[in-house]
Image: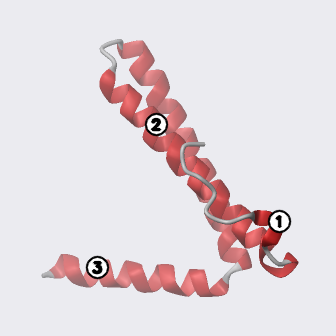
Amino acid sequence: MLSKIPIDLKKVSRENLDREIARVGMMAELDAINLYEQMAAMTDNPTLREVLLDIAKEEKTHLGEFQALLLKEDREQEKELEKGRKEVEELAKK
């Protein structure tokens, strides 16, 4: 993983552990997506590019799975994501 886990998961309370694990999983998937898409942009080999972009797409699915898990564990996160979505919609109207 390119990103460093920002906290020591051994120090996280049992109550918060699952949501922190989901967040770390999301970080790993975002790293993977970025890595594969950057490599795809660098190569001149169309087959390699296609495979890398396909793998990146799979990682986006994994990201969605971790997000779904996080939203089940952290209702505040769910509310804040919706708030952020609405703020972007308002800014996009300007």
- Disc 1 vs disc 2: Cβ atoms closer than 8 Å? no
Q: SS class of the residue under badge 1?
A: helix
Q: Is residue 26 above or below residue 61?
A: below
Q: Earlier in the sequence, mark 1 or mark 2?
A: 1
Q: Earlier in the sequence, mark 1 or mark 3?
A: 1
Residue under the image location 83 percent in, 81 percent down: 15
- Disc 3 vs disc 2: Cβ atoms closer than 8 Å? no
Judging by the rendered image, the residue that carries numbered circle 2 is 35
Q: Is residue 31 left or right of residue 15?
A: left
Q: Quadrant of the N terminus?
A: top right
Q: Earlier in the sequence, mark 3 or mark 2?
A: 2
Q: Is residue 32 above or below residue 61?
A: above
Residue under the image location 30 percent in, 14 percent down: 44
Q: SS class of the residue under badge 3?
A: helix
Q: Is residue 90 above or below residue 63?
A: below
- Label 1 is placed on what type of residue? Lys
Residue under the image location 83 percent in, 78 percent down: 13
Q: In this orientation, which residue lies closer to the viewer: 35 or 71?
A: 35
Dividing the picture into quarters, in which one does residue 11 lie? bottom right
Pair 3/2: label in front: 2
Dividing the picture into quarters, in which one does residue 34 lie? top left
Percent position of residue 82, x then y: 47, 82
Query: Looking at the image, how many numbered discs can be counted on the residues?
Result: 3
Percent position of residue 57, x then y: 50, 40
Q: Which mark is residue 89?
A: 3
- Label 2 is placed on what type of residue? Leu
Percent position of residue 21, x then y: 73, 63
Judging by the rendered image, the residue that carries numbered circle 1 is 10
